Image (tube, rainbow, N blue to C red):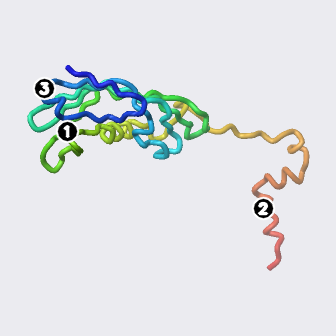
């Protein structure tokens, strides 16, 4: 079984000719920029390398890719905006890539790129509404200070009924 060690700057390309004689192991960290995920969700960021442990196997007219994907997501809580991290683990990961037909995987110069496939599965694993804790109560409400409670003009402005009282005084 051949091994392909990816580096921080590489993307998940492999040569089909290598698969003709043996299975291929793809292991290592892939730079987050390769997945073009930044900006997809303003509350979720991918800033650390994505760890992959994959095995690619050549079948008759297709490629079978199996393994594990792990990424550390830097999130902001949708309720309180507190930063927190969450691990995204796709285990087991599996994909069947046909080499012929209308669903055929893109082959460029005898090379296949797994990046779009992994990107899609990672996006599907993103939390839709990231919360720091399940029972997060959201942003803390400020209580009026002691000075604000004693000043009647400030208290009147904070009272929503005072707006209607001012309008009721209008003579039209």
Q: Quadrant of the C terminus?
A: bottom right
Please say whether residue 89 is visible from this viewpoint. Answer: no
Q: Quadrant of residue 166?
A: bottom right
The image shows residue 139 at horizontal and vertical percentages of 65, 39
Task: Answer with left or right where residue 158 lies relative to residue 71.
Answer: right
Crowd tier of the residue under label 2, counting other residues whose Cα lies within 10 Å: few below 14, some 14–19, many 20 or above: few
Crowd tier of the residue under label 1, counting other residues whose Cα lies within 10 Å: few below 14, some 14–19, many 20 or above: many
The image shows residue 61 at horizontal and vertical percentages of 10, 38
Q: Taking 132 as reference, is 2 above or below it?
A: above
Look at discs 2 and 1 and give the one toward the viewer: 1
Q: Residue visible at 16% across and 41% down? A: 98
Residue position marked by numbered label 2 in the rendering: 163
Of the residues under marks 1 and 3, which one precedes in the sequence? 3
Task: Answer with left or right where residue 76 lies relative to residue 23.
Answer: right
Q: Residue visible at 48% across and 29% down? A: 86
Crowd tier of the residue under label 3, counting other residues whose Cα lies within 10 Å: few below 14, some 14–19, many 20 or above: few
Task: Answer with left or right where residue 91 lies relative to residue 168.
Answer: left
Q: Secondary structure at mark 2?
A: helix
| Residue 97: assigned label | 1
Whether residues under marks 2 and 1 lie with C-beta atoms below 8 angstroms apart, the answer is: no
The image shows residue 51 at horizontal and vertical percentages of 39, 26
Residue position marked by numbered label 3 in the rendering: 21
Query: How far is the residue under mark 2 from the one under mark 1?
Result: 65 Å
| Residue 62: assigned label | none
In the current view of this chain or complex, which residue is farthest to the left? 60
Q: Quadrant of residue 99?
A: top left
Look at discs 3 and 2 and give the one toward the viewer: 3
Please say whether residue 87 is visible from this viewpoint. Answer: yes
Q: Which residue is nearer to you in this view: 126 or 26?
A: 26
């Amino acid at each position: 079984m051949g091994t392909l060690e990816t580096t921080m700057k590489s993307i998940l390309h492999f040569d089909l000719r290598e698969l003709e004689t043996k299975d291929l192991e793809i292991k290592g960290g892939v730079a987050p920029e390769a997945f073009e995920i930044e900006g997809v969700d303003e509350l979720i960021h991918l800033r650390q390398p994505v760890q992959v442990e994959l095995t690619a196997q050549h079948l008759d007219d297709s490629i079978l890719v199996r393994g594990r994907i792990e990424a550390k997501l830097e999130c902001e809580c949708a309720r309180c905006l507190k930063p927190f991290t969450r691990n995204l683990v796709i285990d087991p990961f599996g994909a069947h890539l046909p080499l012929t037909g209308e669903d055929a995987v893109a082959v460029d110069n005898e090379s296949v790129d797994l990046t779009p496939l992994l990107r899609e599965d990672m996006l599907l694993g993103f939390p839709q509404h990231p919360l720091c804790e399940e029972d997060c109560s959201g942003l803390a409400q400020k209580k009026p200070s002691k000075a604000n409670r004693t000043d009647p003009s400030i208290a009147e402005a904070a009272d929503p009924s005072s707006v209607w009282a001012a309008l009721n005084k209008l003579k039209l």
